[in-house]
Amino acid sequence: MRIFRQAQELQQFALETRRAGKSIALVPTMGFLHAGHASLIDIARGRADVVIVSIFVNPTQFGPGEDLDKYPRDFEHDRLVCEEHGADVIFAPEPGAMYAPDASTWVEETVLSRPLCGARRPGHFRGVATVVTKLFHLALPDVAVFGRKDAQQLLVIKRMVRDLNFPIEIVAAPLVRGADGLALSSRNRYLSEEEHQRALVLSRSLRAAKPALEEAGISAAPAIIAAIRHEIEAAGGHVDYVEALDVDTLAEPTETTREVLLALAAYFGSTRLIDNELVQVKK
Ligand code: AMP
């Protein structure tokens, strides 16, 4: 397994790989890898000759006062996970190797990035779209794998790839949960044992809401959302948002809605967690 720290090294490698007729799969991550990330690497491994995992805590997707400085890092552990899962390359640049000090060009998706996390984290998806574009230009992948854990991010990236004609297939990987139901996240590391236990309400309430929404239809969404909010607050969480939106538009559902993204964000202590379920809408 090769480790690159410089953008040009990766791009050179990717150009040579493609010239040799080999296909490339990219798995973009911020590191501190867990079984959710590993599942993405496994999927990538099955989709291309060469698997590149990027590990980069991207400063442009963090807002002021967010956890950029304390975001957990463990390169040795990440290296082992990548090796175990058959990655060929780790790309782990320092911020200075990714952004010129006077960088002034951004990529911005302007519709799907607005609600949910976009409304609470201004500039977040602009940072994501920009860094993913840069990673695409450096790793030159045929396929890139993103997790459904970050459902809105996946939709934004798919839209960007469509709108800007990237010749890249975006593969959606299932959300991986711990045995207790909590969606795996590098940020779970911030939770105390008690907060972790309290946070199980997120997956529990979503799991209960899914069949209820499927059964009762979209008209029941406000009551179901209110119930989820209540459960989270009763468990000692602080709700950032709970919303049910049309998965194609991320707008309020209409008669033509086929599937709803039931998405939430909530704080346990100072840790902000997200989770979601996709719900088929009864016609
Ligand atoms: P992150 O390192 O949190 O930026 O995540 C990198 C990639 O891994 C993104 O595509 C995430 O959606 C995906 N990912 C993170 N956690 C999970 C999970 N629990 N299940 C599936 N994919 C995940």
Image (cartoon, rainbow, N blue to C red):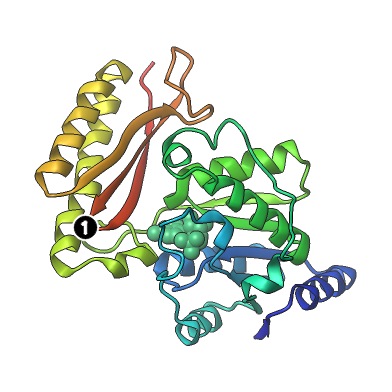
For the residue pair 38 and 102, the one nearer the viewer reads as 102
Figure check: 281 above or below 255: below
- Choose top left, top right, bottom left or bottom right for residue 93: bottom right
Q: Is residue 40 visible?
A: yes
For the residue pair 161 and 119, the one nearer the viewer reads as 119
Which residue is situated farthest in the top direction here?
Answer: 255
Relative image position of residue 110 (x, y in whole percent): 61, 33
For the residue pair 280 and 209, the one nearer the viewer reads as 209
Which residue is situated farthest in the right direction here?
Answer: 19
At 48% from the left edge and 53% from the top edge, which residue is drawn?
63
Helix, strand or loop status at disc 1: loop
At 50% from the left edge and 56% from the top edge, which residue is drawn?
62
Characterize the local packing of mark 1: few (<14), some (14-19) or many (20 or more) Cα atoms within 10 angstroms.
Answer: few
At 69% from the left edge and 68% from the top edge, which residue is drawn?
98
- Which kind of residue does numbered mark 1 sit on? Gly
Quarter of the image with the C terminus is top left
At 42% from the left edge and 52% from the top edge, which residue is drawn?
149
Quarter of the image with the N terminus is bottom right
Relative image position of residue 70 (x, y in whole percent): 40, 71
Q: Is residue 33 left or right of residue 59?
A: left
Q: In this view, does 67 lie to the left or right of 228?
A: right
Figure check: 167 above or below 281: below
- Choose top left, top right, bottom left or bottom right for residue 90: bottom right
What residue sits right under mark 1 in the picture? 269
Relative image position of residue 109 (x, y in whole percent): 63, 38
Figure check: 86 above or below 242: below
- Choose top left, top right, bottom left or bottom right for residue 163: top right
Q: Can residue 50 be seen in this view?
A: no
Which residue is situated farthest in the left direction here?
Answer: 234
